Every structure is written in C-alpha cells, then in structure tokens.
Amino acid sequence: MTLTDLSGAARGRGLALRGAFHPEAADRAPEGTGTIVMIGPDEPRFWPLFTAAPEYRDGAPDPLDRWSRRVIDALAQEVGATALYPSDGPPYAPFIRWAERTGTAWPSPVGPLVQAEAGLFISYRAALALPARLPLSDAPAQPCPRCARPCETACPVGALSPDHPYDVPRCKAHIASDAGKACRAGCLVRRACPVAVDFARLPEQSAFHQSAFMRNWRP
C-alpha cells in the first residue's frame, strides 16, 4: 500500500487525500499508528455521489456525517486502516493539529486553515490511521507569504479578519439578513482565496453547507 494506491481508492468514493504524516507521541494517534492520512471531499466530484446516496435522500439528520462514516469506514476496512472522525469524543482527536502536521495546511491570515490544494475551502471528513509507515510526499510551500491576501478584506462585515478572532454571531447575523444573499451562496472569504480558484464548489453544495451552518440560529 502506498499513498498513491490509497489516493486511487479514495477517489473512487468521491474522496481525496489531504496530506499525511508520521505521528509522534504528542499527536495522540491510536497506538501502533505508523501514518495518519487526512481525508476530505474530492470536490466537486463528491457532490453528485453524495446527493445520489440514501443518506441525502432519507430526510434523517446529519446526512453528510452519516454518508462519510459509511463510505470512509468501508475505505478503511479495504486498506487495513482505522477511521477517525472529528465528532468522535470526548476526548476529540486533534484534527487541526493533524492537518498542520501534514505540512499541507497552515493558519490563514484570517484564522481558518488554508490548504495547499483546497485553499480556504478545506474540510476534513475523517483521518485514516494506518499501521505502516508510508513514504510521504515533499511538503509544498506555504502560499500566504507570496499572496495579495484578498481574504483579509473579503468579508462584508469584517467577521473574518486578521484583526480579531472569527466573529461567528456577526457572520450569522449578516448571512440571515437581506444583505447576506451573496454569502448564502458560499462564504465570500473562502471564495476569495486564490489557492482555491480551481476548487469551486457547486452553488447547491455551498447552499447545503451554509444551511447547516445557520441551523438553530436565532437573532
């Protein structure tokens, strides 16, 4: 098994490898883990696969989480890995630390992680813990130091800014307002990231994620 083999198996399920690393004791990986591989959606290919799945159509809560568990558990079984999910816990696995340990994701100027391929659209559906210590690819260069950083000024209400932590209430209030129509089609800050210029999400996918983000919000 190589990372190339694993990438092919993941891609067949609408998923993509988003970095890997060899864990140390401080990473809190399961005992006996030689390699942690971060798994995210292979966008936009994954969206038609997900919307054709029973989890999307059955009307039950958390369709994407349930789809992810079914599909990624099957992938893990196929490759002899253990699937780990951000929602497993407490205690919760340190997914942000793991993402940074891959050398392919870094804190962006506005706070959320920016990833070498997905930019600010990065999301991690799971991680795979493999017993083998697989050869790793060379780490890419961090994109932000040589970027014009349009993310810093893209938020119309300054909820995502280099000047303060992410202001979630301000963000949600704007999205819910008449002026928030453009944001309801996808976060303007994420869309402004030049790294993600070829990583466009379908409008209906962005609407799905924004609807989930706004669930149970009250002014």
Image (spheres, grey):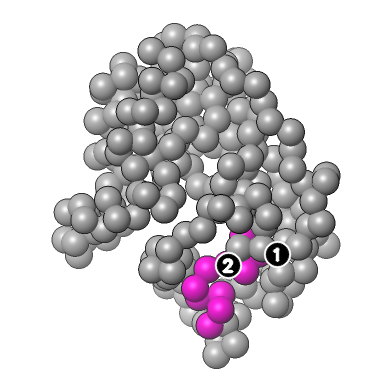
Task: Please tell me which residue is depicted at 62% across the width and 49% down the height of the picture.
Answer: 119
The label on residue 173 is none
Task: Please tell me which residue is depicted at 50% across the width and 17% down the height of the picture.
Answer: 35
Question: Quick one: 111 or 216, which is closer to the camera?
Answer: 111
Residue at image mark 2: 187
Query: What span is colored magenta in the figure?
Result: 181-190
Q: Main secondary structure of the magenta part?
A: helix
- Within 10 Å of disc 1 (Cα), the crowding (few <14, some 14-19, many 20+) is many
**Residue 53 among those drawn in magenta:** no
Task: Please tell me which residue is depicted at 16% across the width and 61% down the height of the picture.
Answer: 58
Residue 56 vs 108, above or below: the answer is below
Question: Quick one: 107 or 61, which is closer to the camera?
Answer: 107
Q: Nearer the viewer, mark 1 or mark 2?
A: 2
Q: Amino acid at mark 1?
A: Leu
**Residue 189 among those drawn in magenta:** yes
First in sequence: mark 1 vs mark 2: 1
Q: Mark 2 and mark 1 in contact (Cβ < 8 Å)?
A: yes
Question: Quick one: 210 or 137, which is closer to the camera?
Answer: 137
Residue 177 drawn at (x, y percent): 55, 87
